[in-house]
Image (cartoon, helix red, strand yellow):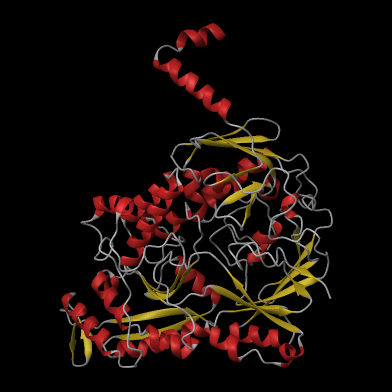
Amino acid sequence: MRQRVTTTLRGFGVALFLAAMGQMAGAESRHGIAMYGEPALPPDFVSLPYANPDAPKGGRIVFGESGGFDSLNPFILKGSAPAGVSLLTVETLLGRSYDEPFSLYGLLAESVDTDEARSYVEFTLRADARFSDGSPVTVEDVLWSFEKLGTEGNPRYAAAWKKIASAEKTGERSVKFTFNTEDRELPLILGLRPILKKAQWEGKDFTASTLEAPIGSGPYVVAQFEPGKFISFRKNPDWWGKDLPFYRGQHNFDEVRYEYFGDGGVVFQAFMGGEIDSFRETNPAKWATNYDFPAVQSGEVVKAEIPHGRPSGIEGLVFNTRKPIFADWRVREALIDAFNFELINQTLNGGAVPRIASYYSNSELGAPPGTPAEGRVLELLTPFKDQLPPGAIEGYSLPVSDGTEANRANLRKATALLEEAGWTVQDGVLKNAQGAPFAFEILLVNGADDIIATANIYVEALKRLGIEAKVTTVDSAQYKDRTNAYDFDMTHYIRSLSLSPGNEQVLYWGSAGVTEPGTRNWMGMNSPAAEAMIAAMLSSETHEDFVAATQALDRVLTSGRYVVPIWYSAVSRLAYKKALHFPEKLPVYGDWLGFQPEVWWYQE
């Protein structure tokens, strides 16, 4: 056999074989993996740097949510599931440290192995990893979960699955995925895939919405629930992972409970009444004026501002460019001009928060507003210069109003742009050449008080241009159905962005989302330039190239005028009962994923 192999491999074939052997020899199993460079924590780390390894165990935390839920399967498109199901009951192969841009450490997997090119990834499962019913987590569960999620799960899982050339069992506890695409982030993305119990789903339709809770390997199990009212998660006393260094000081509560209410205003009333334990305030004006109720005055409720170092992300009112009325960038620019941010910010926030300047502002990944592209950023954008809207290369800045209700200068500019795009005012109504009026609907969810107030002020400003816009509010279930189907003209849009953007960007901005339902490309953008910048991000081998590619993507997105941006905050504002505590050392991401309830604890 050995002779036959040697005889077959001649010339270039021998070189390939030896190169492959060199790569295999250079690869080694590691306790963690980082997107760039090495993970910050050594193999013998005691706990995550922002967790308290000596945190007391016990007690409970109660959250308030607006809306409801009708499913316990958060991994499919149908139904609306509580966020806690995935967060608390289902485990992944690797876990993320939120004190680093993007580093993962072993959870279900005791080690991760890849080569320099990251052409494959191999995970070795821990021998003691168990589901909540006591059965072992197996390689078969991993293989089934990856395929099932990639083919029948939420569309967010499909892109990575399509990049897998082969998936194979390589040992009793090891599994290997080989890739067909250059994508240095894939080993990390696969490390964060939820692992489900294959046997639970045999003979069942995975795509059907269900109130059967998944059997997971996480710290909690679903204890009790009533759709639309509450769900309670109880700590699993036999949780296999309680002694892992990664989890030391995490998941300290015996119970995590979510109470559901009609809208955000009712949630706050419930917090003031002591029914829930923590409330995240997004409005700085309310933070300054509404927190003088007796529990705050007595010290029973504590206020804290949690700083962070993450990008601003994007939040605002998104245009659905699948609708012909919003297809022209000049129309979108005109409607951005009509949005009187300075007046709205003063009215709702007391002028206390800055405007989002670009998708990655507040970080090194953001393109400096109003400045021309240079160096590697310019090099990346130049092949697309004839396709890009104005401002992508030259520099783009959002309009600034004088803060008065009239907003005359910006409305004059908006009128001129609309005329260029074929819209003129006829008898007080903005119409196109065919006489059709410029009218559209702003779809919002019940209880979103601040954005509803924002939209109402905006509607009044649009009347000055002869535009008829109306605000429609629906319940959370209807809202999810309509946004999944892109059945809206304009709606509220939030995309939180990390310090290490990667494959999720395809789901946010990829052209497949123009027609494929359920993606996060709500604006319906179809930009070869954006997809090329994402590909450059994913293939970057140095931090410098990655930053340049992200800044280039930021320019494409911002100059595309897909969203009317509103504001962001460099701090999170949390009010909570004094028996709740969190560590003094905060993660770089601040109050984000992995913070509350993970590293909090209860202590009178």
Residue at x 52%, y 46% (from the top left corner): 36
Residue at x 50%, y 74% (from the top left corner): 479
Left or right, residue 557 beside residue 595? left
Q: Quadrant of the C terminus?
A: bottom right
Left or right, residue 62 beside residue 415? right
Position in image of residue 301 (x %, y %)? 73, 83
Q: Nearer the viewer, residue 460 or 155?
A: 460
Where 601 falls versus 162 (above or below)? below
Q: Is residue 1 visible?
A: no
Position in image of residue 397 (x %, y %)? 32, 72
User: For residue 597, which quarter of the picture?
Assistant: bottom right
Position in image of residue 231 (x %, y %)? 71, 70
Q: Nearer the viewer, residue 127 or 44?
A: 44
Position in image of residue 417 (x %, y %)? 20, 77
Q: Is residue 55 visible?
A: yes
Left or right, residue 364 beside residue 58? left
Residue at x 61%, y 58% (from the top left corner): 99
User: For residue 27, which quarter of the picture?
Assistant: top right
State the count of labels.
0
Left or right, residue 65 beside residue 531? right
